[in-house]
Amino acid sequence: MAYKDEKLSEEKVFKDPVHRYVHVQDRVIWDLIATPEFQRLRRIKQLGTTNLTFHGAEHSRFNHSLGVYEIVRRILNNFKDREHWNNEERLLCLSAALLHDLGHGPFSHSFEKVFRLDHEDFTQAIIVGKTKVNEVLRRVAPDFPGRVADVIGKTYEDQLVVSLISSQIDADRMDYLQRDAYYTGVSYGHFDMERILRVMRPIEDQVVIKSTGMHAVEDYIMSRYQMYWQVYFHPVTRSAEVILSKIFQRAKALYQDPDYDFKLEPTHFISFFEENVTLADYVKLDETIVQYYFHLWQEEEDAILSDLCERFMNRRLFKYVEFNPNLQMNDYLELITLFKQAGIDPEYYLVVDSSSDLPYDFYRPGEEEERLPIHLQMPNGDLKELSRHSDIVESISGKKRTDHKLYFPGDLLKGLADRRVKEAIMEILYGQGETSNVD
Amino acid sequence: MLINHAKLIHFFRVTGGITGRKKLQKMIYILQKSAVPFEEKYQFHFYGPYSEELTLRVEELCNLGFIEETREDKANYFQYHYNVTRAGEGFLEQFTLDMPDMTDKTELLQSRSSRFLELVSTILYFEHLEKCEQIEKLHKMKPKQNFTEAEITEAYQFIKQIRST
């Protein structure tokens, strides 16, 4: 029997708190799960620093990847006898679902921002490069790794296949919303996924929703909206992300300073600092390694690096105030001057964070041919964009959904000896209202 | 702080306003690929390269009052127009942006249809492939668009022209 068709002698199951069981029958999928590159995902948290806000959020990219695989497996069971669906694409879809996040690094959002990397590039590189994952995929067919990489990169010619993994209502989003809600413990994020799976219909180049299933999709859109504001965009999590970014930025600056000697040489980061990262360097890095450095960098001579690491390790986060760049730009410039006078480097301790800095989004119908929206399939076969038919979706699509916050170390400011400078800073920050506590 | 936002305001000022989000998406991508340092992250989507980051930044600029967005109902969809406001001009004055002059490039882009810009940006997305592979990929990814040989030749000439402008 060809490797691609091989089944395990008996079905394996992973117990999963979100989907109850994740079922594996294909030998290829089982072998992919066992590769070191996939096992590495156990050591990358799905939500980065969110566990500093919601302590339950310790789940990993490994959990999530299995979950996405399981959702796609269930969708394909529903699709197998439907028009437009080519069951020959089944293994390709399952492999792409399983591997779609393979290139995520530790705290990848901040990490990528500082080092100008893209985890999607590393996902592609792991799949087509010299790795165990690639060895497994090549046993299916020589061109199979390239096809899996194309599906994940959304450049596969069959856009129906792509839309299962990546679209406005895809397996990726359906898993992370439910999983993140479960592990954070929030009550938003729940929707009737089984119903959505039952009303999904494959058409020529996309998955659409049978119009009678609109209310289940409304529920999904609402949970996406609520999770965005309540979990992904939480200001305390953003405070931790700000500190994390500044640690990476500071460590890089110190590495580039010929007069600075690290007590703990940043061996694992050198290729990142020098911007010549190899695939081997990349897959070596996980959160255990990064936390090890942060732990020891608390003892560094550099006051900024050691302070930032201590803040991150002990959750001594920055405070924040709402910031409107339109009305408060002069305040911001004044604060930079005052911070310098106070001996606090504003480059590391006065940070504006914007909603566009986040890797999450919410549903927007958009303009024609801007991006593919969610389509309802009406009884006569016509397609209608969701918000044109749903009052609920239409109403949340038009709301203001952006903000900017100014982060700063409240404790350092409180302890300032120079009373004039301290009062001037506090007047600007507190003068516009109460400073929010990050506790 | 907000440098990437300022770069976008600068873009809207240079262009004198943009009609159509699809056109905006493709223009910024083509400019990025022509050595203009916009930093928005792009991915391939159904209609070619698309940046969620760009969508969000433009939304932020509108909410801040730096860019004015007007919406026109076109029966099955909405079309959006963008212009810099006086507040946006004022905000921009506080920055010294390290941006090359892109007036000629944006004029070239403005004069083309969003369909043509979709073709150009898709070719650029597959730039790492051999030319014959790029064209093969284009036809596979965009069968419904039916791009003609003449359009494709024109797109390659356009890429050469915009990069040398």
Image (cartoon, rainbow, N blue to C red):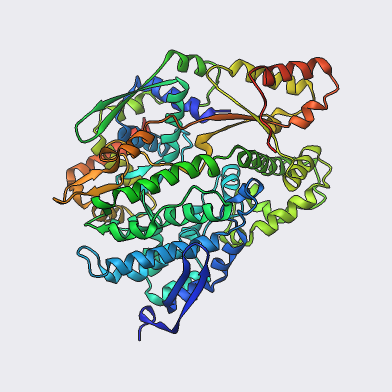
Report the side of A413 relative to A114 (left or right): right
- Residue A183 lies, with reference to residue B153, above or below; the image says below
Q: Residue at x 77, y 52 (%)?
A: A295
- Residue B114 lies, with reference to residue A93, above or below; the image says above
- Nearer to us in this view, A10 or A372: A10
> Measured from the top left, where is residue A181 in percent x and y?
52, 52
Q: How many marks?
A: 0
- Which residue is farthest left? A380
Where is the C terminus of chain A found, in terms of image quarters?
A: top right
- Residue A432: tell me if it is visible: yes
> Measured from the top left, where is residue B37 in percent x and y?
48, 34
Where is the N terminus of chain A found, in terms of image quarters?
A: bottom left
- Residue A163 lies, with reference to residue A234, above or below; the image says below
Report the side of B124 relative to A288 (left or right): left
- Residue B100: tell me if it is visible: no
- Residue B50 lies, with reference to residue A171, above or below; the image says above
- Nearer to us in this view, B71 or B124: B71
> Measured from the top left, where is residue A66 in percent x and y?
48, 65
Q: Residue at x 44, y 33 (%)?
A: B36
The answer to which quarter of the image holds residue A68 is: bottom left
- Which residue is farthest right? A417
